[in-house]
Image (cartoon, rainbow, N blue to C red):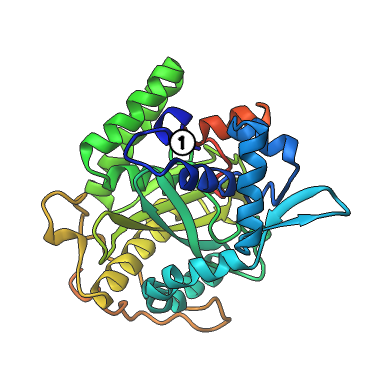
């Protein structure tokens, strides 16, 4: 949630900004909210709040449930999001390989899209044998405590990532120092191995590898992540097998979109780690050894609701996976 001082910026239409502020209070964890909760989360005066929600309801973006006395997102919001989904072509390009990798490692492969300090899920492939929580599409991802978030921060322009780390350090010096160290490790891993790692930083029973992927749209970055429960992992499998496979998947998806990360000196430079063998569904007796296309050369949960919303800019709304 943006601070009210930024919403009152003279360059913004304050009524529109406050309406968006109300809509952003709703999450997968909080799909229905009372007027009291929304007023507490936004800090809006009651008269202003009720004028805004009446307008949002009339526009088909919010609904009010009489039985529960709560507001909820209305189907009209989906029509606003449909143009975004339509232009994320990498979902179609990468999904087959995402599902194959998820099946092979009995885990979960996600695709995230970020701009600024917003990073959200846009696609998910999951093995039927995997009991890992399935995040909702559009759910926000922790930038600090996940492999996905740190891969994204590593791919951001240095000044943007630096401002985020500085903000975390100002809020909590120890947390900021921890994040600075993890981000340094992530950048080193991306340079040397082509992927970065989380070993239970958000959920101790989950480990993950992540790779940033260039978007065709300026100012946007994708991140591919593979998350596996620790009990499914053999010793060394995350670093020696799953990480290289995910890096190969990212190179394949990048080639299909007509670009690759190694062409830009400002992008995190990957090592040319070759996948051990092709990514295939985990079926008995099938172990092809063909390279992938394009690879032939190579937590504040304990805080009150208003405070969690206030800290959303520092990413501590729930991230998923590891």
Q: Alpha-carbon neighbours of circle 1 within 10 Å: few (<14), some, or many (≥20)?
A: some
Q: Place residue 248 in its image quadrant.
A: bottom left
Q: Name the residue under label 1.
A: 2
**Foreground of the two, 39 or 282:** 39
Q: Residue at x 31, y 56 (%)?
A: 220
Which is nearer the eye, 67 or 236? Answer: 67
Does residue 236 show up? Answer: no
**In-front residue for pair 63/318:** 63
Residue 105 seen in this snapshot: yes
Q: Say above or below: 47 vs 258.
A: above
Where is residue 311? Give x, y as percent: 52, 30
151 with respect to 191 (left or right): right
Image: 215 above or below 304: below
Taking 64 as reference, is 106 left or right? left
**Where does the image place residue 81, in percent across and percent down from the top left?**
49, 66
Residue at 37% across / 65% down in the picture? 245
Between 122 and 59, the one lying in front of the other is 59
* Residue 313 place in picture, x, y as percent: 46, 35
């Amino acid at each position: 949630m943006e601070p009210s001082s930024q919403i009152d910026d003279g360059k913004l239409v304050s009524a529109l900004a406050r309406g968006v502020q109300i809509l952003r209070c709703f999450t997968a964890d909080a799909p229905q909210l009372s007027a009291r909760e929304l007023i507490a989360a936004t800090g809006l005066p009651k008269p202003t709040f009720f004028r805004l929600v009446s307008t949002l309801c009339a526009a088909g973006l919010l609904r009010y449930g009489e039985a529960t006395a709560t507001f909820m997102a209305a189907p009209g919001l989906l029509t606003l999001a449909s143009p975004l989904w339509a232009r994320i072509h990498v979902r179609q390009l990468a999904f087959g390989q995402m599902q194959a990798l998820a099946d092979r490692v009995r885990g979960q492969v996600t695709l995230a899209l970020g701009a600024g300090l917003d990073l959200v899920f846009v696609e998910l492939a999951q093995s039927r044998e995997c009991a890992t929580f399935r995040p909702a599409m559009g759910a926000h991802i922790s930038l600090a405590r996940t492999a996905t978030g740190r891969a994204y921060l590593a791919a951001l322009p240095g000044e943007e990532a630096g401002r985020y780390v500085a903000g975390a350090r100002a809020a909590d010096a120890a947390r900021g120092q921890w994040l600075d160290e993890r981000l340094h490790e992530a950048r080193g891993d991306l340079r040397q191995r082509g992927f970065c790692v989380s070993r239970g930083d958000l959920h101790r029973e989950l480990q993950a590898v992540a790779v940033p992927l260039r978007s065709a749209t300026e100012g946007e970055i994708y991140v591919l992540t593979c998350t596996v429960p620790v009990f499914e992992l053999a010793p060394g499998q995350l670093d020696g097998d799953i990480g290289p496979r995910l890096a190969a998947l990212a190179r394949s998806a990048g080639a299909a979109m007509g670009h690759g990360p190694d062409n830009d000196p400002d992008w995190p430079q990957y090592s040319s780690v070759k996948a051990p063998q092709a990514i295939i569904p985990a079926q008995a007796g099938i172990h092809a050894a063909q390279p992938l296309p394009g690879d032939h050369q190579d937590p504040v949960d304990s805080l009150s609701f208003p405070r969690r919303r206030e800290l959303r800019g520092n990413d501590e709304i729930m991230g998923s996976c590891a």
